[in-house]
Image: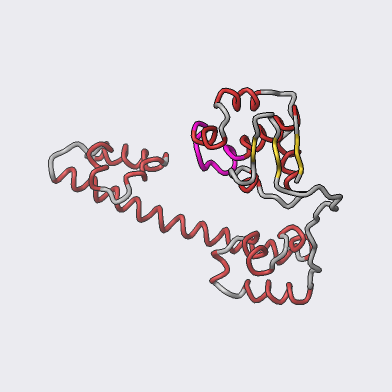
Amino acid sequence: MLAYTGDTATFCFGKALYAHFRFFNLNSGREQSQSLGVSTSCIRSWLRDSTLPKIDEFLNVLYRFNVKPIEFLTQRHLEIGSSGQTTLPFEVANQPAKRRSKTELNHERTEELLTKALSSRVYSRMSFRSFCKNDLKQSHGAVRNRFPEIAKEFSSKHLHYRDARCRVSKAGIEAEIREAAKWCREQGMPTNKRNMIHFLKKPGIFRGEWTNELVSTLQNST
């Protein structure tokens, strides 16, 4: 077990709470402070202290000892005694820093999969980054550097798919707005957004500028 005292304990505990609030957002500050037996004002003063090391340094310490921040923050992993001593649940050891192992890029296999994906409509829905991550299990940057022409063609197909999908979606929204305006005119009501929004399937479609222009056009045409 490793014990920190004094300012180091303040750093570890304060930054652990900061990581907890920022990245996990499980409990409010009051609930977390009550479960750990520390006042909320004390926690806030620790978090405002600019002299403490950065949160990245704290996370690197936990990563080196293979301890997750959420494990560090649980009551059974973090104990604060009356003497102000903080006990951490891992042994001190000169462990080497962990590094992500790189897998060798199989050029022939990668080119084969890319060529096969280009000839399929299914993969046009997937971005080049997602395809490299999910199907090739490789970095999209490494694949793009090795096969720039194929990557460019793959991205171009995906952009064409997105444009076509946006056109279809926009056409559906436009037809829905026109039908709502027609219904308002049949009921003798002004064709404004306040009246039309009650009859739309998705009221949030009025957020775009082109929808506002369409409503103005429909109002002027009546």
- At horizontal 60% and vertical 27% (from top left) the residue drawn is 43
Answer with left or right where residue 115 lies relative to residue 219. right
Q: Nearer the viewer, residue 139 or 123?
A: 139
Residue at the left extreme of this rendering: 187
In the picture shown, does residue 113 fall above or below 42? Answer: below
Q: Residue furthest front?
A: 82
In the rendered view of the protein, which quadrant contains the C terminus?
A: top left
Q: Main secondary structure of the magenta part?
A: helix
Q: Residue drawn 36% across and 41% down?
A: 206
User: Is residue 106 shown above or below 159?
Assistant: below
Measuring from the top left, give residue 167's x and y in whole percent. Answer: 44, 56
Residue 114: give x, y in percent of width and height: 68, 71
User: From which residue to which does the magenta span run?
Assistant: 20-30
- Up the image or down, 99 lies above or below 105; here it is above
In screen coordinates, is 222 left or right of 139? Answer: left
Residue 48 in the image, given as x and y percentages of width and height: 65, 23
Q: Nearer the viewer, residue 3 or 120?
A: 3
Q: Which of the 4 image quadrants contains residue 171?
A: bottom left
Q: How many marks?
A: 0
Q: Viewer-proximal residue, 65 or 216?
A: 65
In magenta stretch: residue 24: yes
Counting from the top left corner in percent of width and height, residue 15 is at: 67, 34
